[in-house]
Amino acid sequence: MSSSLHPMLNVAIKAARAAGAIINRAALDIESVRVAQKQVNDFVTEVDRAAEDAIISTLLTAYPGHGILAEESGQEHGAKNSDYVWIIDPLDGTTNFIHGFPVYCVSIALSFKGKIEHAVVYDPTRNDLFTATRGRGAFLNERRIRVSKRTQLKDCLVSTGFPFRPGDNFRAYMRMFGEITQRTAGVRRPGAAALDLAYVAAGFCDGFFETGLSIWDVAAGSLLVTEAGGLIGNFTGEADFLEQRECLAGNPRAYGQLVGILGKYSKFATVEDKLVVDAALQRQDNEANESEGTQD
C-alpha cells in the first residue's frame, strides 16, 4: 500500500486485490465454478460471492462503522445509517468470466453523504489498478491518466453495453447503436461497464453509453472519469445519474456530441423528442413488415 494515498483508498485497494486473487484462482478452473441465474442472461457465481465476502471483510475490519451496498448482498452488512457507504461490484463482467473471456473487474467506491470520494477498479487478468480520490486525480498503476483529446466524433472510439435484461427496449437501443456507429470510428462492447468507464478515464476509449446499469456498475468508474477530466451523466447530460439506469461518459468534446445524439432516447427527454423517437421506431417496424411481406 502507498503511504501517499488516502488511508481509505489504501484499504479499498487491499480489498480489491484480495477479491482479484480469488477471481484469478477460480479462473484457472472455470469449468468447476458453480453458476446460478438471477434472471435471464444475468448470472452469479460462487466466485462473485466469495470475492464480495473478502471485500466486505476487509472494509469492515478497517471501518466497522461504515455502510455497505453490494451487488450480491445488498445492504445486509455494515452500519445502516452511516454517512460513509462502500458501493461494491465484486465481479463486473460475470458472463465474460464464466466463458473464460478475460474482460472483467472488481469495482469499489466510497460514498460520503451521497458523493463518491474514492474509487478503485481492478482488472485481475492484467493486474491493472485504476484509482481515484476526489480532487486528487485518477491513476492507472500509480501513473496519472487523462481522458483523450479527440474533438471530432468521427475519430472517436466509443464503448457500449447491449441490453440483455427482460423489459429492456432493444429496438430503441439498436437505433442508438446505429446512429453512433455511423458517426464514429468504431463501437466496442467489452462487457464490463466499470472497466469501460476506466478506459474512458485512461483515454483508451473516447466515450461510453449504456442503459439499465445499477449504481455498483458505475459508482467507481464515474469518479475515475471526472478526475481524469471527463464528463459523465445521463443521456441528456444531467450529472445526477447514479441511480437513473442510463449512463453516458466521455472526454468533454465527445460527451457534448454524444448528448446531442442520445438525448432524445433518454427517459428524461422532452415530449417532442420522445415523439420523434416513437415515429422513427414505427417507421422501422413498418419497413421490416414490408420487407417480410415482399419475401413471402
Image (cartoon, rainbow, N blue to C red):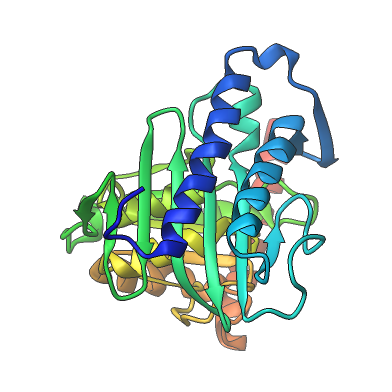
Q: Position of residue 230 (x, y in %)?
A: 30, 68
Residue at 54% of width from left, 55% of height from top?
108
Q: Position of residue 117 (x, y in %)?
A: 45, 72
* Front in this rendered view, residue 72 or 161: 72
Outermost residue, bottom direction?
Answer: 271
Determine the image quadrant of residue 225: bottom left
Residue at 26% of width from left, 66% of height from top?
137
Q: Position of residue 75 (x, y in %)?
A: 78, 64
Q: Is residue 283 visible?
A: no
Quadrant in which the C terminus appears? top right
Q: Is residue 59 left or right of residue 11?
A: right
* Front in this rendered view, residue 235 or 90: 90
* Front in this rendered view, residue 185 or 72: 72
Residue at 30% of width from left, 76% of height from top?
135
Count of labels in the image? 0
Task: Answer above or below: position of 241 versus 124.
Answer: below
Determine the image quadrant of residue 256: bottom left
* Front in this rendered view, residue 51 or 259: 51
